[in-house]
Image (cartoon, helix red, strand yellow):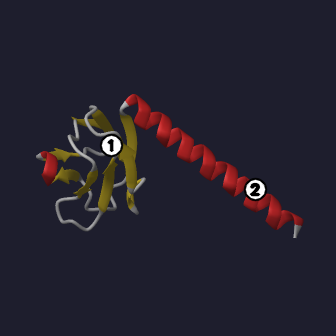
């Protein structure tokens, strides 16, 4: 029972740190996203409206169709070369949700604009 509690405490701490790290990244306008066999990670990021944001996207696997990032609402269509960080900068003008995906729309992510 003690090991279960310790595991839950560790998991809570990790989740809290990840959330704070994402918030810190959003504050600077740079958000790191990786493409794995599971798709875009994290799947959801939050950014402020009216401020430039840069998604720094690195595809880490060839075992996915997510070789491009497409965000129609912002007229973005960027290739994601394997192992190379690609910077995608845009300024969301109003609160809401922006969806991005691979070209086949099999893997998706969301930018929440507040």
Secondary structure found at label 1: strand
Left or right: residue 16 versus residue 3 is: left
Image height of 73 relative to 87, above or below: below
Left or right: residue 44 versus residue 21 is: left
Q: Is residue 30 visible?
A: yes
Residue 64 in the image: x percent, y percent?
A: 31, 62
Image height of 34 relative to 90, above or below: below
Dot 1 or dot 2, earlier in sequence: 2
Residue 93 in the image: x percent, y percent?
A: 20, 40
Secondary structure found at label 2: helix
Toward the top, the furthest residue is 28
How many other residues sit within 10 Å of disc 2, few (<14), some (14-19) or many (≥20)? Answer: few
| Residue of label 1 | 57
At x 49%, y 34%, the residue is 24
Image quadrant assignment for residue 106? bottom left
Image height of 64 relative to 96, above or below: below
Residue 33 in the image: x percent, y percent?
A: 38, 46
At x 28%, y 40%, the residue is 49
| Residue of label 2 | 9
Left or right: residue 10 versus residue 71 is: right
Q: Which mark is in front, 1 or 2?
A: 2
């Amino acid at each position: 029972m003690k090991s279960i509690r310790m595991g839950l405490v560790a998991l809570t701490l990790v989740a809290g740190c990840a959330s704070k790290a994402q918030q810190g990244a959003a504050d600077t306008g740079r958000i790191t996203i990786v493409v794995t066999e599971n798709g875009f990670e994290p799947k959801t990021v939050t950014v402020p409206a009216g401020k430039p944001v840069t998604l720094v996207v690195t595809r880490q696997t060839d075992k996915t169709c997510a070789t491009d990032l497409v965000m129609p609402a912002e007229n973005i269509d960027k290739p994601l070369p394997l192992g190379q960080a690609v910077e995608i900068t845009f300024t969301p003008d109003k609160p809401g949700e922006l969806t991005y995906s691979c070209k086949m729309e099999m893997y998706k992510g969301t930018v929440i604009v507040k």
